[in-house]
Every structure is written in structure tokens, then in C-alpha cells.
Image (cartoon, rainbow, N blue to C red):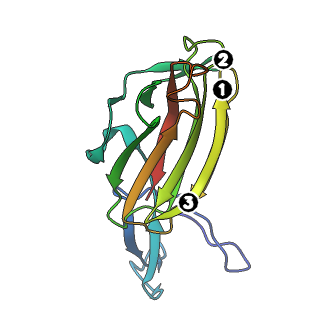
Amino acid sequence: MKRVRSDGSFVFPARPRTHGRTFWRVVTATKSVRAIGKSAVVAIAAYQWTWLNTFSKVGTDSGWYSDPADANGVHYAHPLVNRSDCYGDGENWIEFDLGRHFKQLEATVSMRDDAQTDARSSFTVIVDGQTVASGDVRLGISKRFNVGVGKGLRLRLQETNPAAGSRACTDGNVVWGNIRVLG
């Protein structure tokens, strides 16, 4: 129970038990009268972060895994990691169904600390066919992003080893550190 200020305003903390849309109403009362007034029902959206490595993948072209990893001196307990190798076209991807339930995605992309010294890679985040984030990483360089996914349906994480198939290619592991979605 919270008291109303003299100007009629009030503040109270609320912790919905589930995420999604919830409905609230304010009821005023006194010690002697149980309810003397109530507000209209108000819809409130409650969001929570969910680790992407807990989702089932829709598809992939290579061996992605979610074991904890160290990248650029940071330990990530909830990463997605892909083996960036020198074979084939150098492009690796994984897809997830977001079910139009999420609005934001964040992660830090880097090379694992045990990658070769000159390891490098490019990454792209694609939602429903549209690129929402991209960048280049190499050993000791991280790229952090926080982007809207616009209630998208399909999320694709793509990693490209630009030197694949050449003598300049170096192996490494690309870490999508603590990647999560808000919905």
C-alpha cells in the first residue's frame, strides 16, 4: 500500500510475474472504507532479457556451440561460438525463430583469446532478410551492439572469414558474447 501525495501523484514498484502484456488498475482506499475509487484498466508491457543460447536453432551450416568462452580478456558465460576455419567459402551462419516476441538484441562479438594472433572475421546480424548490425573483429578487438529487431520472425547470425581459401587464412573462434534478446 502506498500513500497518495498532496498533489494526487504516487509511485510504487511493480514486478510482474511473467513478461508480456499485463493489465493494472489503481484502487484507492482508507482505513475505514475498503475501496473508494478506482482507475481505468491500463495495459503495461513487461519485458525480460533471455539468453539466445537457450533457444533451439532453426538451422545452421556449421558447428556452433554455447560453452563459456573468453574473448578480449572477458569471460562470457552465455555465448554462442563458431569455429572460423579456412575451408570452403569461409561463411558460417546460424538461425533462430524469434516468433515476433522480441524487440531488441545485444551482444559483444570478438575472437576467442586462444585464436591465432592474426585471426580476423566479419559478422552480420540479419532479421527477416534485413541487416541490423555488422562489423569486423580480430584478436583483441571487440564490437558491442544493441539493436532493435522490430518484432522480427527469423534471426540469422553470420560470420565470414575474409581470407578463407587463401594462404593468408588463420583459424579462430568467433564469440558472440552473452548474446540475448529482450521481449
Q: Judge left or right: residue 118 versus residue 178.
A: right
Percent position of residue 168, x then y: 61, 21
- N-terminal of the two: label 2 or label 1? 2
Q: Splitting the image into 4 quarters, where does residue 121 fall?
A: top right
Identify the residue position indicated by label 2 in the image. Answer: 118
At 59% across and 67% down in the image, what residue appears?
Answer: 3
Q: Which mark is residue 131?
A: 3
Q: Which mark is residue 138?
A: 1
* Mark 2 residue type: Asp
* Mark 1 residue type: Arg
Q: Splitting the image into 4 quarters, where does residue 75 fall?
A: top right
Are the residues flagged by discs 3 and 2 in contact, CB closer than 8 Å? no
Of 183 and 19, the residue lying toward us: 183
Whether residue 120 is visible here, answered yes or no, is yes
| Alpha carbon distance from label 3 to label 2 | 27 Å
Q: Judge left or right: residue 21 versus residue 159.
A: left
